[in-house]
Image (tube, helix red, strand yellow):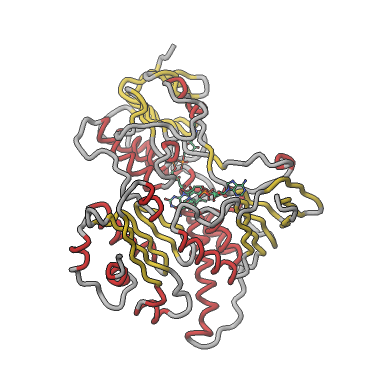
Amino acid sequence: MATQRYDIAVIGLGPGGEHVAGELASAGLSVLAVDHRLVGGECPYWACIPSKMMVRAATSLAEARRVPLLAGATAEVIPDWSPVADRIRDEATDDWDDKAAVDRLTGKGATFVRGTGRVVSANEVEVDGEAYAIGRGIVVNTGTNPLIPPIDGIEDVDIWTNRDLVEARELPSSIVILGGGAIGCEFGQVLARFGVDVTIVESGPRLLSNEEPEASDRLRQLFEDEGVQVRLGATATKVSASDGRVELGLDDGSSVTGERLLVATGRRVDPAAAGLDRVGVDPGAHAVPVDDRCRVTDGVWAIGDITGKGAFTHVSMYQAGIVVRDLLGQDGPAADYRALPRVTFTEPEVGAVGLTEAQARDQGIDVRTGSVPIAQTSRGFIQGPGNEGILKLVEDAGRGVLVGATTMGPAGGEVLGALSVAVHAEVPVETLRSMIYAYPTFHRGIETALGDLG
Ligand SMILES: Cc1cc2nc3c(=O)[nH]c(=O)nc-3n(C[C@H](O)[C@H](O)[C@H](O)COP(=O)(O)OP(=O)(O)OC[C@H]3O[C@@H](n4cnc5c(N)ncnc54)[C@H](O)[C@@H]3O)c2cc1C
Ligand SMILES: NC(=O)c1ccc[n+]([C@@H]2O[C@H](COP(=O)([O-])OP(=O)(O)OC[C@H]3O[C@@H](n4cnc5c(N)ncnc54)[C@H](O)[C@@H]3O)[C@@H](O)[C@H]2O)c1
């Protein structure tokens, strides 16, 4: 029997859950906010922020190595992981202490409980066995955990996930990375630039398989030029460890070895762990079904990676805003994922929004594409070393609007901004063609790619 009552329970305080709890408490509702680890979730402590600090450091090494090509001589650039590890501890994670975040949340009036929460019904939750009656709504933002594939021998090997690498004080001399998605590519390039011998093993035919093949192919080439070994279409059949090395056997009979094995093969959603099976969600679901207000059922909302709408912090925050409005009875647009932006922070950055060419064709859209290699633009020419990339547009020719774009190149994630507006607002291609694009910018490549649509 629940003796304590709240208007709202937020189970899991990833970026979106923390926002929902804070906003609703500030609006005067009584809010029970629950997390069994750190307030803020994966993003600030083991994901976006520390990984982008690593990228920042690795990019500075790459730029220093370009000095002889552009600006004279440098003393030898000697990579050292200590400043990165220190920055992650001191500036990003406060040594994995969330006191500041907890204070911020409770300062807004929420009650924070550190524990494992579970939905019991649409008006009751449980935290470590303690029951709470919930009057107005339960919001679930429990995120994901690294997915460990069932490879023969893997349970006997001390594998790394993103969490181990982010916490590492020292780097191994060599590493095998299983998975060539966003995590594998970002970390793989960082580690290679710090002198680690990196092998990426990807079971699919290309890196960043959700993005345009042109981007994947360029990235693979660049990685190989930097000394990263890329094994595509390779399935791991067994793994073992001995003498301080991990050996991964592959389906073609070959094997790869490294001091460490980093598993980056996607994420696992566990609806039942959050009690969502109690309100009708299939416990084996790979994503929690939600409507366009992120409702699972009457009285229960879900946001973030578990909804399968894009495992990004900006999706979690976007959905949080929708749920806050819904719970406060305010008007506002429903969720619309047509112009979902994403950026993989390799160098060059791979920015993308909306549909790829293949996805647009699969939807039966009358597709026209236009593209330009960044090196062929004025700014790319000026940039010289490090100017690799491509800008590609996907047009719905029937409607004369862009439905997708890829901005791979220096500052690719920033160039993406203009094209996110174009896709989101369905700006007519003719209007985009009539604009003035500043010279010589990277985004001016958009004009050239528009001219190439055909
Ligand atoms: C290495 C890496 C790099 C990334 N880089 C980027 C990036 O650059 N940009 C970007 O947009 N995204 C990035 N992401 C993805 C991003 O981290 C997630 O999309 C983001 O954290 C949002 O997740 P979420 O809202 O689902 O919750 P999460 O951040 O996963 O947080 C969920 C919270 O719920 C808690 N929890 C779980 N179960 C329970 C329970 N039963 N009871 C109580 N608490 C519970 C957990 O302790 C956790 O604090 C990256 C991910 C990784 C792994
Ligand atoms: N910059 C960013 O926004 C950013 C950065 C990192 C992670 N993320 C988010 O985190 C999520 C998880 O990242 P991720 O890289 O783990 O997942 P992912 O889904 O992006 O990539 C996983 C890759 O592993 C491969 N794979 C799966 N099983 C395999 C196996 N047994 N052997 C070899 N390869 C295998 C898949 O084919 C896929 O290419 C991403 O979906 C992304 O949304 C975002």
Where is residue 374 drawn, in percent x and y? Answer: 39, 73
Question: Which residue is pictured at 46% across the width and 57% down the height?
Answer: 344
Kindly indicate the quadrant of the structure image that contains residue 443.
Answer: bottom left
Does residue 69 appear left or right of residue 450 in this picture? right
Question: Which residue is pictured at 76% across the width and 47% down the height?
Answer: 240
Seen from the viewer's position, the closer of residues 434 and 191 is 434
Where is residue 145 drawn, in percent x and y? Answer: 54, 40
Where is residue 179 drawn, in percent x and y? Answer: 58, 51
Picture quarter with the C terminus = bottom left
Picture quarter with the N terminus = top left
Q: Is residue 152 above or below residue 186?
A: above
Does residue 449 appear left or right of residue 47 in this picture? left
Question: Which residue is pictured at 30% across the width and 23% down the height?
Answer: 136
Where is residue 34 drawn, in percent x and y? Answer: 44, 31
Q: Is residue 56 above or below residue 24?
A: below
Seen from the viewer's position, the closer of residues 14 and 102 is 14
For this orientation, the residue located farthest to the top is 1
For this orientation, the residue located farthest to the bottom is 72
Q: Is residue 74 above or below residue 185?
A: below
Total tally of numbered discs in the picture: 0
Question: Which residue is pictured at 38% across the width and 57% down the height?
Answer: 352
Does residue 126 appear left or right of residue 433 in this picture? right
